[in-house]
Image (tube, rainbow, N blue to C red):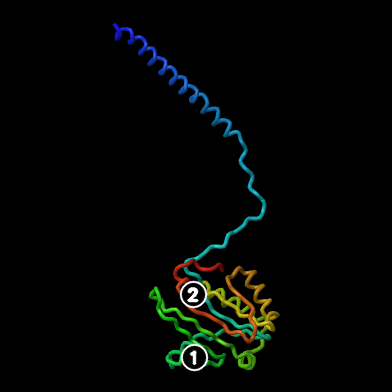
Amino acid sequence: METDGATPSAFLDIATNLLAILLIVTLFALAAPRQRDEGASQLPARPSAGPHFVEPQRERFPPFSRFYFVLADRVAIWDQEAVVTALTAAPDTRSGATWQGRFVWRPEPLVTRDIDTFQLEFRLDREAILSRSPPWSAEQTERLVDELAQDAARDRIAPVFVVHPDGLETFVPIYERLQTRGQRFRWFTQRPDEPVLIGRHVAQFTHYGLYW
């Protein structure tokens, strides 16, 4: 008798649940076309006319560097091959000179990684540059900018300008032309009595390249 009495109640619960499901499905079916029509009637967003911020891109491998000394109406490329040749000829001395100046090579012992880290110090001979390099001109600026563009496209080389205080006026036109043409370069000022320091260390292989 208990089973017979519970059967009508169970069927009533099932019918109620089915009716609720049908109502929910009907509501969704009626609401979907309305939302689609309202979305289609909205005007597209207007493009912003404000300035856009372009984030500099980091590079795993930055471009190769080529150094230029700028001083007193002179622009001279640093002949790094001459330094390498002098080191190769006398590797045990770890120091020497080229016609552009003197250098000291400081190799560092391998510590945790198989990377031959080192630091090279170069002191420019200003008198030699002034006596052997011709005065700079506007034509040479245009020629240099064209050559730098070719070097960047062909060999992925970017210039680094070491500017002495008396070379700032000479460097301004070069800076402006490079900026106008969108070429990549670096520059920094340096006192005549300061050495140029370059080297190789572990972070150059484990971190992203610096911004250019």
Q: Is residue 62 left or right of residue 143?
A: left
Q: Determine the secondary structure under disc 2.
A: helix
The residue identified by callout 2 is: 155
| Quarter of the rendering containing residue 178 | bottom right
Counting from the top left corner in percent of width and height, residue 20 is at: 45, 19
Q: Residues within 10 Å of mark 2 (few under 14, many from 20)?
A: few
The residue identified by callout 1 is: 95
Q: Say if 91 sits above or below 13 in the image.
A: below
Residue located at (50% from left, 75% from top): 64
Residue located at (67% from left, 51% from top): 49
Residue located at (56% from left, 73% from top): 149
Q: The residue under label 1 is which amino acid type?
A: Ser
Counting from the top left corner in percent of width and height, residue 173 is at: 68, 76
Q: The residue under label 2 is which amino acid type?
A: Asp
Q: Is residue 193 left or right of residue 89?
A: right
Q: CA distance from mark 1 to mark 2?
A: 29 Å
Quarter of the figure with the C terminus: bottom right
